[in-house]
Amino acid sequence: MTAIYDFTARAIDGADVSLADYRGKVLLIVNTASKCGFTPQYEGLETLHEQLADQGLVILGFPCNQFRAQEPGDEAEIAAFCATTYDVKFPMFAKVEVNGPNAHPLYAWLKSHAKGILGTEGIKWNFTKFLIDRNGGIVCRYAPTTKPEAIRGDIEELLEVA
């Protein structure tokens, strides 16, 4: 697989979703967790979704339990948490691994095409973000500490290109 649109992921409700469905959109792909110090970033992500979805932004949340078991629930529990705590309306997917031999193929591809600090590939923590342009190209990889509102300008630049 050589393009982001070649991947499929299981939605949090169990349906298979082709990322080709998002062709022509600006994507922000985030590995999430419900019991992390960065979990309040859901609020900022949802704000971006509410304010920029009509212009072409799609946020894709991928729960992951690989970092200190901070996403222990099953998909139903994760979906309920996101809905009741942060009123998340952007697409959420089934729990995935982002590192190691069982990493979801999407994350293996993202990491190989957008290195982290000092050229490392591994995801360091929850809420690592990948910004994808309307053509499926990776624009930037953001650290978990980067709040969603801090990348709004980068997203808006990509949205204006259309």
Image: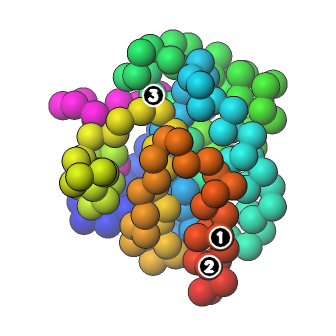
Q: CA distance from mark 3 to mark 2?
A: 29 Å
Q: Which residue is mark 3?
A: 64
Q: Mark 1 or mark 3, which is nearer the start of the sequence?
A: 3
Above or below residue 134? Residue 91 is above
Rendered image quadrant of residue 69: top left
- Mark 2 Cα-neighbour bin, 10 Å: few <14, some 14–19, many ≥20: few
Classify mark 1: helix, strand or loop. Answer: helix
Say which of marks 3 and 2 sits in front.
Answer: 2
Rendered image quadrant of residue 65: top left
Q: Which residue is mark 2?
A: 157
Measuring 22% from the left and 31% from the top, which residue is drawn there? 100
Chief SS of the magenta region = loop
- In the image, what residue type sits under mark 1? Gly
Is 99 within the magenta? yes
Instruction: Give residue 79's position: percent from left, percent from top.
Output: 67, 26
Is 12 within the magenta? no
Measuring 21% from the left and 54% from the top, which residue is drawn there? 119
Classify mark 3: helix, strand or loop. Answer: loop
